[in-house]
Image (spheres, rainbow, N blue to C red):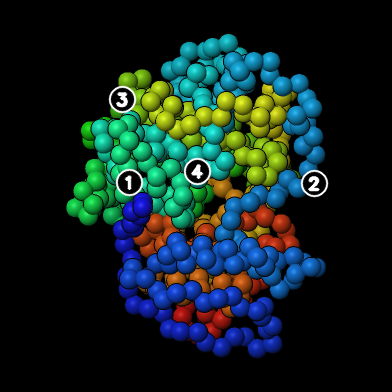
Amino acid sequence: RVLVQTLGGGGVALAGRRGLPDGRVLPRAVTRVAAISATGIVSVEQFVGVALEALEDVFEPNANPSGFVDLAMLDSRLLDGYDTSGTGLERKAPTSGIELRQCVAQMLVEGGHGAPWVSSSPGVQGWLSPEWVTILGAKSEAEAVESVVAGALAATTMKTGVLVVAPYRPAWPSPSGRLSHPVTSDGSVTAPSVLYVDPSAHGDDINAALDTGAETLRSSSGAEVGAVVLGNPSPATGVVASTGAILEVMHWCQSQDDVHVIADETGACGVYVSRPSSSFPGVAAAVAAGIGPMALTTNPNAKMTDDEDDEPAWGRKAGFMSTSSLWRKANTQLHVVTSFGSAAGISRGKTTCLLVTRDDRVRSGAGSDPFANGLQALMGDGGTAAREAISHHNMLLRRRQKKVRTALDALGVATGPAAAVPTTRADGGGYVWIDLSEFCGGSFEGETRLWEELAITYRVLIVPGGLCGAARPGYFRAAVAGTEEALEKGLERLELGVRAANDTGCG
């Protein structure tokens, strides 16, 4: 069984349940979760148990108004009703696998992927060789990242340690996924050890966080680090990793022996507006010199607008730079996982995940999809309709995030990235990172009790930050890309919970 740990936690428990605001009618409650764990952080089993129970009683405005509002699962419904017929299978698909790879590579380049030293190839204007692109067989983004991590570990010299830069995905890796059932070349099975490390617990010093994580793995399970996972943008906060942070992770891995970097960039399509970002000449200079963010300048082409009716730029035009932009020619141990899903107009549940790597061992170990039906549909017109869908989706996403932040600001609840997360980078992701630390008593026990209160009493499910590996208690992730009706009901119930917590003196 995969061993998953986090660094941080502990503290004093929050007071128990109190009364509710007068005149409020609450939906019926779900089963109370088990006792709080030794760390105070809600366990994966507890979270999944409530989530599964919620799936059996889902909120519907008319059919089931007292049902459960799930703001934990990222399931974008923003393009429901949007005309995406142009991305259907009825259009002419690429005539060959090579042509399909060329179309995909060109769209990835526009999305901010690829290295600046790559020569142009047929159908692709530099930055990315189609030969580096592999269509993964994984059915979900989390599964895709896990398969690449498993492939990277298999390419090392029997290393089984994985460090994850937190906050990251909740309940990852899956108990039934590749990392839980690894098989080495000699047929033996060795369960990997996965440790979430949050740099904010180390004064934002990424090197210190990774050093501490590596020593913790070594002392607790005897595992040596073979892979480091980095979210860009973060699947928890939606914040794009700074160039300096990416370089620090890469330099740390290069200073070790045989350690791979896996960048989870499956949310790259959702990066819609760039605040001051790094210029591409600056990136190239930093890579050549091997230095950090001080060498980088502002991208004059980044699109700056607050017009809600404007369809924002995405990818490279929005200033997003993939981790692959910092590739060095001699370093092949950097791998990027990205995806095209509902934001690109693909039917829900039909996400296509891609691996960008120059390591044949990892490519073969990750598992590919030789048919790529979903990608053929997406690229049938060279990706024109998909590009339009992404822009439209991001316009709607920006409105949703603004709506949520405005609603919670009225309650005095801070939204957006935690104080330790840089706010000068692009926004992305179908969620907001909410600061409810004032209502958690400064502990993960308090965070778990607040999460439980919201889930059981108010029937709204959000993701506690402790489950994402956050070092500081009190932060929660809420998905905002579902239906409008569910989001409004979820915000209403969240407000009830926050007001009740405030009335009890917890905040």
Mark 1 vs mark 2: which is more N-terminal? 2
Q: Which mark is nearer the camera, 2 or 4?
A: 4
Q: Quick check: can you spot residue 353?
A: yes
- Residue found at x 46% / y 84%: 16
- In the rendered structure, which amino acid carries the disc numbered 2? Gly
**Amino acid under disc 1:** Pro
Which of 203/178 is in front? 178
Q: Quadrant of residue 230?
A: top left
State which tag comes first along the sequence, 3 or 2. Answer: 2
Q: Which residue is mark 4?
A: 143
Q: Earlier in the sequence, mark 3 or mark 4?
A: 4
Q: Which residue occupies 51% across, 62% down?
A: 48
Q: Residues within 10 Å of mark 2 (few under 14, many from 20)?
A: few
The label nearer to you, 3 versus 2, is 2
**Which residue has dot 2 on it?**
81
Q: Are marks 3 and 1 in contact (CB under 8 Å)?
A: no
Task: Determine whether 46 is above or below 185 in the image.
Answer: below
- Badge 2 or badge 4: first in the primary sequence: 2
In which quarter of the view is residue 353 placed?
top right
Residue corresponding to mark 1: 192
The answer for how far apart the CA atoms under marks 3 and 4 are is 35 Å
User: Which of the two discs, 3 and 4, sits closer to the camera?
Assistant: 4
Q: CA distance from mark 4 to mark 1?
A: 16 Å
Question: Within 10 Å of the Cα at label 1, are there few (<14), some (14-19), or many (20+) other Cα atoms?
Answer: many
Q: What secondary structure is found at the residue carrying circle 2? A: loop
Q: Looking at the image, tell me whether mark 4 or mark 1 is earlier in sequence order.
A: 4
